[in-house]
Image (cartoon, grey):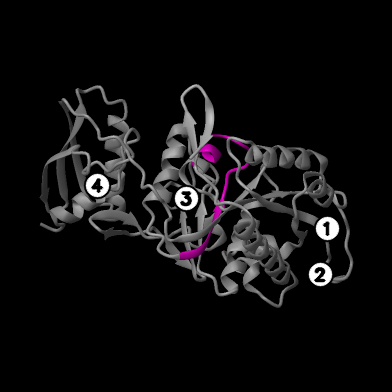
Amino acid sequence: MKYSTDKVLEILNLVKHPESGKGLVEIGMVENLTIEGLKIKFDLVAKSGKDPFAKSLIKAAEKTLKFYLEEAVEVEITQTKKIFEAANFKAPSKPLSGVKNIIAVSSGKGGVGKSTVAANLAVALARTGAKVGLLDADIWGPSIPMMFGVEDLKPAATQVDGKTLILPIEKFGIKILSVGFFVDPNKALIWRGSMASNALSQLINEGDWGKLDYVVLDMPPGTGDIHLTLVQTLAVTGVIVVSTPQKVALADAKKGVAMYQQKDINVPVLGLVENMAYFTPAELPNNKYYLFGKDGCKNLAKELDVPLLGEIPIVQSIMESGDKGRPIALDEINPMGIAFGLLAKNVIDRIEWRNTQMNPTKKVQMKSGAGCATD
C-alpha cells in the first residue's frame, strides 16, 4: 500500500459538499475505501440518489486525489444510494478570531487597480512590523497569487483540534489564501453566486490564519453576493474604496461607499484611494500629468465626508512588479514604495481612530423576506 487510509481520507475531506460546506468524510459520504498501490476505490454515498452535486463531487474528489498525491493515481468511485442527510454547516461563531483588524479593499467597478492596491497595502503594512494576512476574495478573477509569484504553489492541510484546516502560503512575511490556488488558471471559473460564496466562506472559516494584526481582503469589483457573504461572515473593521479619477469610475465608487453605509450593513468606510491619479515619467520625476482628470477622489471624499487615504500615480514599474511577482511596495526607497508606505500609515491612523471612536462592527444577519439586520 503506497498511501495510507488516513492520508487519503484527509485529502478527500478537503472536498466540500456545497450544501453543508463540510468535507465528504466528515459528513459520511465516503464508504468502503480500499487502496491497492496506486488504485483507490470507494463509494460516494448520495442522499437517496437525488443529490444534485454527486457528479461534480466525483470529479472533484478524483482531481483532488490526483493533485495531492500524484497524477498516476487511479481513482474508481461508485455512486451509491442511501438515505443520507448532510449535517447543516455551522460556521465558527468568531471566524478569524485571532485577527485584530479586517480591512476590505473594494471598488465600484473593475479595472481601477483594486488588487494592486490591496497587495501593496498588505506589503506596506507588513513593512511596519505588523503581522499581516491577505485573502483574495475576488473569486472570479483571483490575481493575488500571480502578484506574489506563488501561482504554482498549493496550500497544505493541517490538523488543529481535530479539524482539517488550510495552511496559507507565506510570501514576504504575509499569509496568503486565494481560490486561485485551487482552480485551473487557464480556465474560466463558471460558478453561481452560492458556489462562489461557499468558496469564500471556506477560505475564511477553514484557513489556519493564526494571530494577525491585519487581514486585507481583496474584494471583487461591484456589489453582490460575495460582498454580502463577507459582511455576514465577518465583522469587518472597515472598508477602503479604490477608484480612478474619471467620472464613470467615481460614480461607481460612490455606489460602493453607499452600499457599505446602508443602515442594515453599516461597515465603516475608512476612506478612498485614488489610483492612477497622475502620470510621472521616470525621466521627469517631479512632473505630474493628470491623464484622467484631477482631484476626482479628493472632491468625492469631501462630498461623502470620508478621508482621502492616498493618491497612487501611474508608473510602469507598478505593472512590471506585479507581473514579476514582487509588489513594488517592497522597495522602500522607490517613490512608489514611499507612496504605499504613506498609504499604510494613513490606514493605520484611520483604523486607530475608528477603533477608539466607534463601536465594533457587527456581522450582518439576513432575515427571511426582511432584508438585512445586524447582530
Q: Residue at (22%, 56%) from the top-left corner?
A: 162
Q: Amino acid at mark 2?
A: Ala
**Mark in front: 3 vs 1:** 1
Q: Position of residue 203 (x, y in %)?
A: 42, 50
- Return the residue nearer the eye: 110 or 92: 92
> Looking at the rendering, which quadrant does residue 261 occupy?
top right
Q: Residues within 10 Å of mark 3 (few under 14, many from 20)?
A: many
Residues at marks 3 and 1 touching, judged by CB atoms closer than 8 Å:
no
Mark 3: amino acid: Gly
Tell me where residue 134 appears, x and y as whole percent: 52, 58
Residue assigned mark 2? 282
The residue under label 3 is 180
| Element class at badge 3 | helix
| Residue 12 image label | 4
**Residue 17 point in image, percent of width and height:** 31, 37
Q: CA distance from mark 2 to mark 3?
A: 33 Å
Instruction: Report the residue marked by disc 1.
Output: 278
For this rendering, which residue is in front, 101 or 20?
101
Magenta-colored span: 212-229
